[in-house]
Amino acid sequence: MDCLFCKIIDREIPADIVYEDDEVLAFEDINPQAPTHVLLIPKRHIATLNDIADADRALIGRLTQVAADLARERGFAEEGYRVVMNCNEQAGQTVYHIHMHLMGGRRFTWPAG
Ligand code: 5GP
Ligand code: ZN
């Protein structure tokens, strides 16, 4: 399958990996938008949020939990941080393997652009 993030999982493309377990991989975003900008992905290929099945429920919960763990590790859990998942073209999704952006270390505005 021609998927950039599957290639990162398979170590065909290098990435700065910050967390890995059987189900989840987390790595530094190549174009960071905050002092911390990590992408968390399931190792199972799922193209968009619209493709999540009942069987993926725990996996999606796990992404959130790992994001919170990384926020704690990096010291900005209490001051606050942002997690974002973009779905499809209008939200700006560019890689079609679901990913959670974890961004922290600066103040964010709301509503998002
Ligand atoms: P999206 O726009 O789909 O929500 O987010 C895709 C993210 O993947 C972007 O923030 C982009 O900077 C990041 N990205 C794109 N290509 C690569 C890559 O080859 N390596 C890494 N580490 N991040 C990438
Ligand atoms: Zn993939």
Image: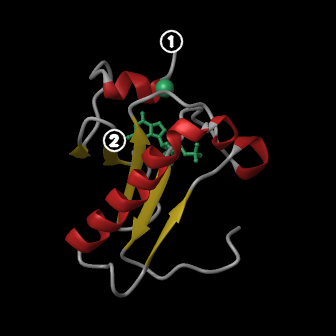
10 Å crowding of disc 1: few (<14), some (14-19), many (20+): few
Farthest-out residue, right: 90
Q: Going by the image, does 46 lie left or right of 81? A: right
Indicate the quadrant where residue 59 lies: top left
Q: Is residue 108 above or below residue 1?
A: below
Q: Going by the image, does 52 lie left or right of 5? A: right
Name the quarter where the C terminus is drawn.
bottom right
Q: Amino acid at mark 1?
A: Met
Q: Is residue 4 above or below residue 82?
A: above
Q: Is residue 12 above or below residue 96?
A: above
10 Å crowding of disc 2: few (<14), some (14-19), many (20+): some
User: Camera-side residue: 65 or 81?
Assistant: 65
Residue 41 image offset from top left, x and y in percent: 42, 41
If you read the primary sequence from the N terminus, does the residue marked by circle 2 or circle 1 appear first? 1
Residue named by callout 1: 1
Q: Which residue is depicted at the point 60% across and 31% down?
A: 47
User: Camera-side residue: 53 or 106?
Assistant: 53
Q: Going by the image, does 36 lie left or right of 54? A: left
What's the mark number on residue 47? none
User: Camera-side residue: 11 or 22?
Assistant: 22
Residue named by callout 2: 24
Q: Amino acid at mark 2?
A: Val
Residue 110 image offset from top left, x and y in percent: 66, 80
| CB at disc 1 and ligand 2 closer than 8 Å | yes
Residue 105 image offset from top left, x and y in percent: 36, 76
Indicate the quadrant where residue 48 lies: top right
